[in-house]
Image (cartoon, grey):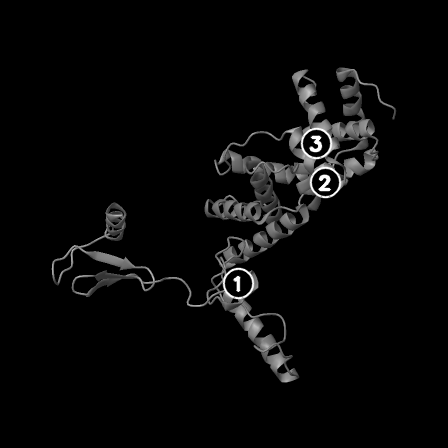
Amino acid sequence: MEEHVAMERKDLYEDQERCPYCGSEKVIFDPSCGEHVCIECGNVIGYIIDEGPEWRSFTPEQRAKRTRVGAPLSPLRPDQGLSTTIDWRNKDGSGNDLNFSKRIQALRLRRTNKMFNTGDGNEKNLRIALGEIERIGSQLGLPKAVREEAAMLYRKAARMKLIKGRSVESMAAACIYAACKTNIIPRSLDEVSKVSKSDRKEIARSFRLLVGEGLVRKAPPSRAVDFIPRIVSRLDLSMRVQQTAVEILEKARALGLTSGRMPEGLAAAAVYLATLLHGERRTQREIASIVSVTEVTIRNRFKELLQGLNLIVRV
């Protein structure tokens, strides 16, 4: 019993300090009020400031409503989210609709605010480029982290004056493609160029420039296996089809059948073969539209897989 009490007192005085008033070392910390107190003379030696909120929240909606700080910085905005914006909805702080005169006043305020927030030509160029990155990333279904990395890459290229003499659209698409490569997200150059306002040749030229200047770190080449989950998800196929398609590609790689072949075409052919094996048939046109390859490419890769793996299926 005495040992137990001694252990408790030792834990109590473990984080002790010497009292500057009486010199006692019996200083305890009271977590309820965040104070260091001397138990001999009762003096409060020091306290810890609580940097947390003084309110409590039990749901994410309450936390978002009660917080009093702004949104986090985002490289997807030209000013990184530091400037003030006026909401486009014509409502007051209580959510009521504004009358006609207030709407006109709010419209003028928006125009004035937009004029002041728009800086020189470089900032206008950045605004257009970041809008293009947001648009391409949204159409390709890319996560926010990839879009932000593409935006930071474009900012670096602009600081190095690599944008001069090239279209904003091609450089923005090249940054999106580079961010996908570094994050190992399967998006082909054809898919990026399909939703971009620039052609494939210009995007490839801008991407090679980024690589040559060292702005893009070395990333492994795209693998056919990386494209399979997206194809299976878009076609609403079962997991056994996905597993079979992965096994087909692994066996084909071991036999050297994947060398010199486009990963998109190989993935599409493997999924097509797996759907035939499991009776979940999908047309070659449906599969080709997902990875932006032609039906001829799928048929050629499909025949190579059949001959190389010695498989017999009924088409």
Residue 275's place in the image compared with 22, above or below, is: above
| Mark 1 neighbour class, 10 Å CA radius: few under 14, some 14 to 19, many 20 or more | few
Query: Is residue 266 shown to the viewer in this render?
Result: no
Of label 2 and label 1, which has the lower sequence position? 1
Tell which of 130 and 310 is nearer to you: 310
Q: Position of residue 281 (x, y in %)?
A: 84, 33
Instruction: Residue type at mark 3: give it.
Output: Glu
Res 51 quadrant in image: bottom left
For the question of whether residue 238 can be seen, the reply is yes
Type of amino acid at the residue the image marks with label 2: Ser
Query: Label 2 vs label 1: CA separation?
Result: 35 Å
Residue 280 rendering spot, x and y as whole percentages = 82, 34
Tell me: 296 left or right of 262: right
Q: How many marks?
A: 3
Question: Which mark is nearer the camera, 2 or 3?
Answer: 2
Percent x, y of residue 288: 78, 35
Residue 98 location in percent, x, y?
Answer: 63, 80
Distance of label 3 from label 1 (alpha carbons): 46 Å
Compare marks 3 and 1 and give the one earlier in the sequence: 1
